[in-house]
Amino acid sequence: MYEFLILALIAFILDIKTNDCIKEQRYKSAMIYINLYFHHLLNMFVNFGWISDNPMVLKIYLIMPIIILLHWKTNDGKCAVTQHANEICGNPENEYMHDFLYLLGIKESKYYDLVQNTILFGGMTIAVRKLLK
C-alpha cells in the first residue's frame, strides 16, 4: 500500500512544481494541497492498484474504477475533485487534473482514451487473475 502513497507523493510534487495555480495558492489555502494529494492518491490507486498482492487491496481496486466511472457518468463527465480544485484556482471548469498522464503529455493527445482504458482494463484483468490464483 505504501507504493501508492509514494507514487501519489511524486505526482503531487511534480504537479506543484508545474502548476501555476498551486504556486499562487500555496500561502492562501491548505485545502488545495489536501485536495490535490487526495486526488493524486486516488488516481494512482485506480491506475496502479493491480500492483498490490494483497487480496483486500485488489478487491477494493476492482470496485474503485466502477465507482469513479459511475460518478463521471452522473456528473456530466466531470470529476468532482477536479471541479473543486478548479474552483479554488479559478480555472475553467474543463481544466484537466495534472496527473501522471498529463505530465507525460498523453492527456491532451488523441491516444489518451486508448492509454487510459488500456491501463484500467489491463490492470483490472491482472487483479482478477491474481485473485483467482
Image: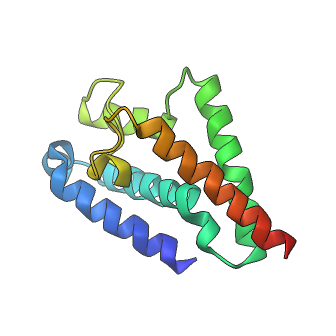
Give the colour scheme shown: rainbow
Q: Quadrant of residue 13?
A: bottom left
The one nearer the camera, 108 or 78, is 108
The one nearer the camera, 87 or 18, is 18
Residue 76 seen anywhere in this rendered image of the structure = yes
Q: Which quadrant of the rendered structure holds the C terminus?
A: bottom right
The one nearer the camera, 74 or 126, is 126
Q: Is residue 116 left or right of residue 88?
A: right
The percent position of residue 75, horizontal first and vertical second, equals: 58, 24
Q: Quadrant of residue 49?
A: bottom right
Q: Is residue 2 left or right of residue 85?
A: right
Residue for point 24% across, 61% down = 14
Q: Residue furthest right?
A: 132
Q: Is residue 74 left or right of residue 34?
A: right
Residue 27 seen anywhere in this rendered image of the structure = no
Seen in the picture, residue 54 relative to 12 is either above or below; the reply is below
The percent position of residue 82, horizontal first and vertical second, equals: 41, 38
The percent position of residue 77, horizontal first and vertical second, equals: 53, 25
Seen in the picture, residue 74 relative to 129 is either above or below; the reply is above
Residue for point 65% across, 47% down = 65
